[in-house]
Amino acid sequence: MILTARLLFPISAPPIQDGSLLIRDGIIRAVGPISTLQRDFPGEPSTSLGDAILLPGLVNAHTHLELTGLHGRLPLGRSFTEWAGALLTLRPTLDGTFFASSSMEGAATLLRSGVTCVADITSSGASLHPLKTLGLRGIVFQEVLGLDPEQAADRLTAAEEALRSLALEASGSLLSVGLSPHAPYSLSERLLDRCADLLRRSNIPATIHLAESPEEVAYIGLGLGPIASDLLPLVGRGAPSHRVLGESPTAFLARLGLLSKRLTAVHAVHLGGSDLELLRQHGVALALCPRSNSHLRVGTAPLPRYLAYRLRVGLGTDSLASNETLSLWDEMRFALTLYDGAVTPQQLVTMGTLGGASALGMATEIGSLDPGKRADVIALAIDHLDDTDPYGSLVRQASEKSVVLSMVDGKVLYRA
């Protein structure tokens, strides 16, 4: 099958006017102008998408789909610890029915908006079923929390059992599983150490919220601040359960052996030069969530610096507990304004496709329209594309409503 469109964004190469893709057995076999592919593959069935734009499926590098139903129920625009405390209080009231319906709603929203691959963190395990049912690609990370050192062994055992269950359920799908120690401040040092050991033994991918807020930096380094005074009492703790050594959150994880090329660090707002060197040394990837950071008032990640360091960087929406939409197009537009010329539209589109794929260790399979890669492809209808600034036009105009087709592994999963 040959797909043709007015413009094709390979991401790995300049846009192609009147571009086309040859797809066979779920794999992109050739990319080029329509005239070239029709000449080289005579008789191949062809589908014209008219004035649409073809590009790789988006990669949402950080979500919590099971929290989709919390949209509007938590305080945004105040402080990180106030939001986190409200979530800690509300979460025990949520049940499996809530998590299942939230996950399905979130997964369907991602597919409609052009996301074909997702990195999702789940505590309940509910997100794997809808992602599998809809045919999306991605990684489902089992979340681990626990500040009581005495419960570290039991918490890890429970996580290992949950991972086995998720892996069994993921069989026959385009999903894999990984581990997500929630954050340096929400696990005891003993539990983080056990997670590091599990990750070394299993070689599975991992993701962790890292250096998200100034409160986290103060708590890990000094054992002080609102996390110590406001959040610890909510989980029955009177003092930190890690050694307070004046470390940054990144240095703390490095000491425990958690940094590796299989780790994606989420948010990464407050990283110093030594932190960046540690991340680069260990090959850690980043998933940035600019709108969530803004809503929680934690600061702005220095994205231009991360790109200059040549770190693998993807984009995530986080959950609707801390964001207004699950649209990566909205994330790109917000970031374009936020960084005010320091980051280009092309860099943002790359972060939402090939950058996210690279951050998740999937860049050899997806993220760009290249021969040999899996056919994860989307098509968008954009009315007024500026040929002199195609990436800028795309970022400024694209939305969920623009998506007219989403394909994963050569199968059309959504058509408007």
Image: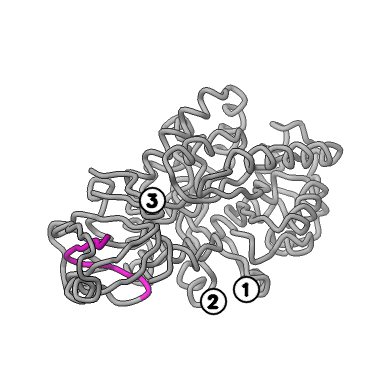
Q: Are marks 3 and 2 in contact (CB under 8 Å)?
A: no
Seen from the viewer's position, the closer of residues 233 and 190 is 190
Residue 39, image x and y in percent?
19, 75
Kindly identify the amino acid type of the residue bearing the numbered disc 2: Tyr
362 relative position to 383: left or right: right
Nearer the viewer's eye, disc 3 or disc 1?
3
Three-letter code, disc 3: Val
Q: Quadrant of residue 76?
A: top left
Q: Image point 21% across, 74% down: which residue?
A: 33
User: Is disc 2 placed on a helix, strand or loop?
Assistant: loop
Residue 9 within the magenta-colored segment of the rendering:
yes
Residue assigned mark 2: 309
The span from disc 3 to disc 2 (Cα, nearest Å) is 27 Å
Please report the residue visible at 80 percent of the width from the left and 41 percent of the height from the top.
Answer: 239
- The residue segment tinted magenta is 1-12
Q: Which mark is residue 115?
A: 3
> In the rendered image of this protein, does residue 184 appear above or below residue 245?
above
Label 1 vs 2, first from the N-terminus = 1
* Residue drawn at x 17%, y 58% as measured from the top left: 48
Whole-angstrom CA distance, mark 1 to mark 2, is: 8 Å
At numbered mark 3, what does the secondary structure look like: helix, strand or loop? strand
Mark 1 packing: few (<14 Cα in 10 Å), some, or many (20+)?
some
Dot 1 amino acid type: Arg
The number of numbered badges drawn on the structure is 3
Asked whether the beta carbons under mark 1 and mark 2 sit within 8 Å of each other, the answer is: yes
Quadrant the C terminus occupies: top left
Tag 1 secondary structure: helix
Q: Nearer the viewer, mark 3 or mark 2?
A: 3
Residue located beneath label 1 in the image: 280
Q: Nearer the viewer, residue 225 or 123?
A: 123
